[in-house]
Image (cartoon, rainbow, N blue to C red):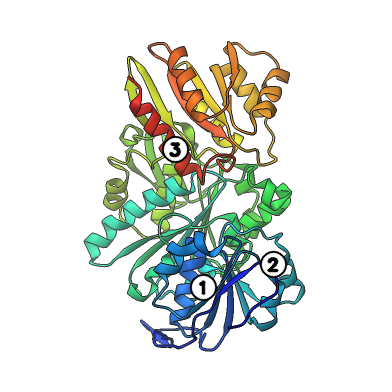
């Protein structure tokens, strides 16, 4: 057994290739990974999907994670039938001495010394989304943006499912949400539809673009990872960078960050926005409370805005984006309408949890940036009691503070960023609405205070503006905690 000095625990599997496969897949020639020495950094779901695929393809796979082996037992058990070496507890640079390719799981910081050394040594890097796009037999639609990715991807998925049922094919939805699509590559056929949510973390390493690429918006987010807005925007723009003349790009006419990327479009440009475009631009818009689409020459009415169950202008834009994407995928109007009808949104995204004594409780735990909380606040006309906080991502809070002063009745803060947010709101120009600011220790106490403060007709909104990592594994766990405690209220 090979060992490295230090605290890392090495669990070494035998590199027998009983499960190896490579070659032709549904008419697509796959890369030959047999014998390639691959280091996968990060044992989260994306890293595990990549390790699983490459091990089955005959690669010599090592999975490396900072967590100790005992914490990774569930992941190890899930991969026990594969010949994979596990290196746990640290990221020893010696691993790079015997590595041909480095695969990175989505949440792994690019500032890790082992990744900096990978770049210095010019070792090729990849991730699960890159490999999926290289190997898939079907055309792929990729969706990215600072906000609305999951809602839009889910909605396009519903439309695609309607098409799949009509045409006896399969529609696959995944990527940054749900199950990585790489896990299902062996099941896919050339006529299938694949819809993939892609994050800026994944795009940083990718050198391939999907056939249809949509950038919903670009607003300040993840600056703790990317450092500057320029770097963050550049990461998002990579979804367009490798497109060809026959591909399709979809941009948001109402978002400067998205629309300013128009010069980077290499293929056909479609767009979406609330208003009719000034030029003969193909895309979706609203006319007389009807969702419409123009191919650049003629306009058609698809369905009334009243059919949309989602709240807020941002969600209306998400629907318009989904319509434009579906049109690029050549889905029919009936299939588009089927996807929209009855769609009440995705968990933790302006999710109505409960109504108690005339007070409605909404879970918007997905709001991990001030910009997303602003969008949530703007979705309501009712008096708002806002629960905000968590961990800051080095993002500006000034606009959030202005919106709170003018639209929030009571602000209840929790988590690491409480004092930072409180300071920003107190320094903002006083508005017409804000009556109190309360700081508490955690989310549970914030819920209790909100429950005691609320009056009939109020909305209690969890829309933190910060990440969950100061107290929870992720925004979903934070949202589940909110749900649990709200349902226990009497």
Q: Residue tagged by mark 2? A: 115
Residue 363, placed above or below residue 148 = above
Within-10-Å neighbours for mark 3: few <14, some 14–19, many 20+: many
Foreground label between 1 and 3: 3
Residue 226, placed above or below residue 475 = below
Instruction: Tell me, yes or no, whether the two marked residues, 1 and 2, touch with CB atoms within 8 Å.
Output: no
Q: Residue tagged by mark 3? A: 479
Q: Place residue 114 in its image quadrant.
A: bottom right
How many numbered tags mark residues here? 3
Residue at point 58%, 56% (across, down)? 107
Q: Nearer the viewer, residue 26 or 53?
A: 53
In this picture, residue 66 sits left or right of residue 141: right
Within-10-Å neighbours for mark 2: few <14, some 14–19, many 20+: many
Q: Residue 224 location, x and y as percent?
A: 69, 47
Give the number of the disc on residue 131.
Answer: 1
Q: Tell me the SS state at disc 1.
A: helix
Residue at point 43%, 45% (across, down)? 151
Q: Place residue 422 in its image quadrant.
A: top right
Q: Residue 319 location, x and y as percent?
A: 41, 43
Name which of mark 1 and mark 2 comes first in the sequence: 2
């Amino acid at each position: 057994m090979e060992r490295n000095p230090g605290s890392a625990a090495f669990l070494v599997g035998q590199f027998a290739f009983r499960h190896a496969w490579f070659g032709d897949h549904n008419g697509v020639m796959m890369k030959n990974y047999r014998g390639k020495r691959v280091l996968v950094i990060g044992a989260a779901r994306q890293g595990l999907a990549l390790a699983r695929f490459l091990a089955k393809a005959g690669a010599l796979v090592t999975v490396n994670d900072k967590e100790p082996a005992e914490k990774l037992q569930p992941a190890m058990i899930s991969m026990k039938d594969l010949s994979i070496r596990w290196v746990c507890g640290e990221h020893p640079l010696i691993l790079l001495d015997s590595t041909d390719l480095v695969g990175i799981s989505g949440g792994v910081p690019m500032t890790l010394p082992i990744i900096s050394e990978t770049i210095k040594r010019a070792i090729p890097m990849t991730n699960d989304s890159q490999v999926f796009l290289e190997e898939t037999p079907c055309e792929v639609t990729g969706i990215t943006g600072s906000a609305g990715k999951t809602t839009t991807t889910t909605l396009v998925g519903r439309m695609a499912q309607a098409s799949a049922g009509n045409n006896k094919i399969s529609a696959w939805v995944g990527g940054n949400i749900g199950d990585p699509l790489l896990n299902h590559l062996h099941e896919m056929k050339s006529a299938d539809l694949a819809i993939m949510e892609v994050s800026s973390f994944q795009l940083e390493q990718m050198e391939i673009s999907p056939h249809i690429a949509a950038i919903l918006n670009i607003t300040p987010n993840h600056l703790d990872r990317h450092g500057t807005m320029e770097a963050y925007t550049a990461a998002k723009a990579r979804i367009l960078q490798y497109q060809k003349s026959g591909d399709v790009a979809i941009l948001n006419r109402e978002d400067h960050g998205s629309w300013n990327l128009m010069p980077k479009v290499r293929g056909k440009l479609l767009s979406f926005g609330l208003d009719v475009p000034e030029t003969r631009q193909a895309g979706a818009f609203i006319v007389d409370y009807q969702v419409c689409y123009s191919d650049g020459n003629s306009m058609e009415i698809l369905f009334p805005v009243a059919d949309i169950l989602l709240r807020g202008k941002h969600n209306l834009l998400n629907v318009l984006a989904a319509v434009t994407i579906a049109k690029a995928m050549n889905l029919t109007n009936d299939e588009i309408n089927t996807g929209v009808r009855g769609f009440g949104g995705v968990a933790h995204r302006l999710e109505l949890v409960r109504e108690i004594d005339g007070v409605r409780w909404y879970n918007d735990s997905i709001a991990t940036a001030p910009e997303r909380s602003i969008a949530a606040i703007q979705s309501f006309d009712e008096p708002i009691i806002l629960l905000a906080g968590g961990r800051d991502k080095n993002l500006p809070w000034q606009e959030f503070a202005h919106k709170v002063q003018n639209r929030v009745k009571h602000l209840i803060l929790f988590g690491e960023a409480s004092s930072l947010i409180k300071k920003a709101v107190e320094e903002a120009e006083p508005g017409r609405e804000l009556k109190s600011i309360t700081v508490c220790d955690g989310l549970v106490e914030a819920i209790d205070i909100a429950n005691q403060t609320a009056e009939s007709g109020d909305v209690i909104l969890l829309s933190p503006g910060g990440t969950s990592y100061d107290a929870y594994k992720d925004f979903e766990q934070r949202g589940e905690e909110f749900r649990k405690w709200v349902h226990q209220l009497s």
